[in-house]
Amino acid sequence: MHSPIGVLAFVVLFSVVAAPARAADIPPYIAAAVADPARPAADVARDAERKPAETLAFAGIKPGDRVLELVPAGGYYTRILSRLVGPAGNIYAFTPSEILKVFPDAANSSRMIASDPQYSNVSVLVMPTTAMVLPRNLDAVWTTQNYHDLHLAKFFPNLDMHVFNKAMFAALRPGGLYFVSDHDAEPGSGLRDNKLHRIDSELVRDEVREAGFTFDGETDLLRDAGDPHTASVFDASIRGHTDQFTFRFRRPAR
């Protein structure tokens, strides 16, 4: 029979769940990036549900970092990341060209942001996942609410996620961060509910670790126990209140 101390040690070792950052713990460079007056009002209105300051504090993105933002969509995080990393950093907004075959305007928000002198450290990358030429020695790869899209057959009918995640691994410097947050599906469901724009968090954890990454922690910051995991994330009954996992992975330092 296991002792209570042994069980506790097991939970602490394998859960690696970080407590949400308090307002007093938010670095000033993150607070300033979120408070950017140039952010659209529609983005600011979503801050209460998306909690960008606390999320970025957990991730550990810093001024001067070079970040690949994977599937930036409308650019909610692009502006914040741009302000955060500052003039010494770079944001590479990467939209796989397969998505443009379904949504031709998918990279337009990224292009609009990159054309704004206030966000001159943003570069737009559009290329097929089968022929990716990515920057090297990145500090971070960042994706929020869009990892599940990589499994959608309408965009990527034949994408090998092991090959894809290995490409993210190769783009990062040793010790670099792979940050993934998305709408969770029912535990054990795998890809069954991908049509709901959800993905099983355990599947994501396994996929990323299989590419050589180490699991570096998670936070329950965006968790919502009231989400039954049965509706599309765009359904009015649940939109803005989905249960989301937030994972941090690392390329080993050596």
Image (tube, helix red, strand yellow):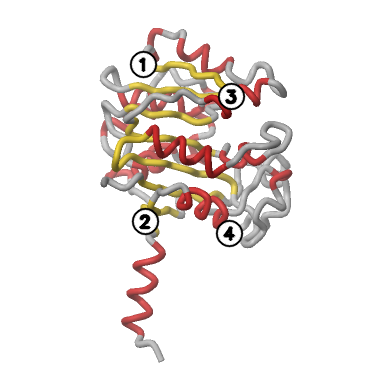
Q: How far apart are marks 2 and 1 (CA)?
A: 31 Å
Residue closer to the observer: 252 or 226: 252
Which numbered disc flags the more N-terminal residue, 3 or 2? 2
Q: Mark 3 points at which residue?
A: 128
Which numbered disc flags the more N-terminal residue, 4 or 3? 3
Residue closer to the observer: 149 or 24: 149
Residue closer to the observer: 41 or 162: 162
1 or 3: mark nearer the eye: 3
Instruction: Identify whether 206 is placed above or below 170.
Output: below
200 left or right of 174 in image? right
Q: Name the residue under label 2.
A: 19
Q: Residue 121 carries which label?
A: 1
Q: Residue 56 carries which label?
A: none
Instruction: Identify whether 80 is placed above or below 61.
Output: above
Disc 2, disc 1: CB below 8 Å?
no
71 left or right of 157 in image? left
Q: Mark 4 points at which residue?
A: 225
Q: Distance between the residues labelled 1 and 3?
A: 23 Å
Q: Residues within 10 Å of mark 4 (few under 14, many from 20)?
A: few
In the rendering, at what x and y percent does residue 66 appear? 33, 27
Residue type for callout 2 = Ala
